[in-house]
Amino acid sequence: MGERRKLGDVALDLLLFAGMMTAGLYVARNLLTPMLSNLADPDKEKHEQARRQAKAHLERLNRQRNIDRDGDDESGDARMIQRVEDLVLNEYENLVALEMVAPEDIHVGFNGCGKTMLAKALALESGASFINLHISTMTEKWYGDSNKIVRAVFSLARKMQPAIIFIDEIDAVLGTRRSGEHEASGMVKAEFMTLWDGLTSANASGMPAQIVVLGATNRIHDIDEAILRRMPKKFPVPLPGLEQRRKILQLILQDTKTDAEHFDLDYVSKITAGMSGSDIKEACRDAAMAPVREYMRQYRGEGRRMASVDSSQFRGIRTDDFLSNRGSHMDKTDGKSTKDAAGKRKNKSRGSGGEYENVDELLVESQD
């Protein structure tokens, strides 16, 4: 009996010891470990926040999966679009095979002509990482931080190559350097050009970097000459012609209810001459509001409450809706105004041979 009692006491002691060890490990793992890690790294929260910010910046710079436009949605000049696609998608691979660097290009055109959309479509079809470099991304309040951001962008592009660095409104970022310009702005431009030239240097595999720089502007004469020298390919993005305007209208109105008997697509395509794709979109938005306003007036006249409005009862868009809305975007945009204004502007000849002389006139002539 005594031996059995001793064995029972030993077993009980072992169970108690195991329970105490388990509780101790639980406390050490869930309570002491975080405390010790915080003591070892007092700035852990700041580091975690920096990682989250870095991840957010990466998501903002590379949103290729969110690009919902491809080449089939581009309703601009077919020859120009094909030439740009050949340069970026085809010539680039051939030039890399020859150990040459593919030339960067710049899209020149009026507001709302699809320059940015074209760059996104190129990134989507080429499968390259798309880095949309915003002005706000390059602007920092601390002296020298903007230079670090520019260097980080090129470093990121090298790690994500093949990559496309796109700069919208490039004239605002890399404009002509002037004597009264702030020193920080000049340093950013110098840093950008230095890293840009560095793309020609070979990587670890002995090949040039697979990075293409694209820019878009409607003020090419405001861009610094050194930047233009680094962007030898320039593609005018003109206002859409008759067939392009028809395609744009079809794309915009494909999910919109139209009155088949009273809507003439060909006529609307003609009366929107001289309008950009953005102007046409706003004109369609104004026209789509005409049935809504008409239905609301009828509702109020019958004394019914607006809370019970049924959108399925709206009539379809008609041709007259593009013409009868006083103060609409169609009324504000004269078909000849953009064309005439561009014809009056003459850019100064810049660079050797004046290869981008009178760009606005080139855009106007492409419409005729």
Image (tube, rainbow, N blue to C red):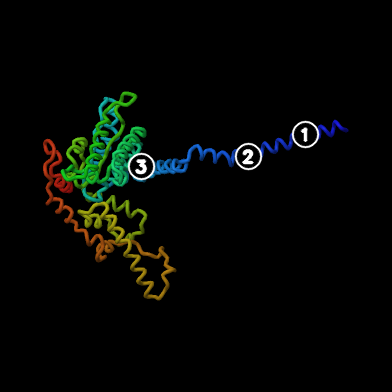
Residue 147 relative to residue 232: left or right: right
Residue 133 relative to residue 20: left or right: left
Disc 3 and disc 1: Cα gap in Å? 63 Å
The residue that disc 1 covers is 11
Comparing marks 3 and 2, which lies closer to the viewer?
2
Neighbour class for label 1 at 10 Å: few (<14), some, many (≥20)? Answer: few
Secondary structure at numbered mark 1: helix
Indicate the amino acid at tag 3.
Leu
Query: Who comes first in sequence, dot 3 or dot 1?
Result: 1
- Spot occupied by residue 12 in the image (x, y as percentages of width and height): 77, 36
Comparing marks 3 and 1, which lies closer to the viewer?
1
- Spot occupied by residue 186 in the image (x, y as percentages of width and height): 22, 41
In the drawing, what numbered circle is on residue 116? none
Neighbour class for label 3 at 10 Å: few (<14), some, many (≥20)? Answer: many
The residue that disc 2 covers is 26
Residue at 35% across, 42% down = 61
The residue that disc 3 covers is 61
In the picture as drawn, the residue positioned furthest to the top comes out as 206
Q: Is residue 193 above or below residue 97?
A: below
In the picture as drawn, the residue positioned furthest to the right comes out as 1
Query: Who comes first in sequence, dot 3 or dot 2?
Result: 2
Q: Quadrant of the image for the N terminus? A: top right
Q: Is residue 168 above or below residue 266?
A: above
Neighbour class for label 2 at 10 Å: few (<14), some, many (≥20)? Answer: few
* In the foreground, 11 or 264: 11
Indicate the amino acid at tag 1.
Ala
Residue 79 seen in the figure: no
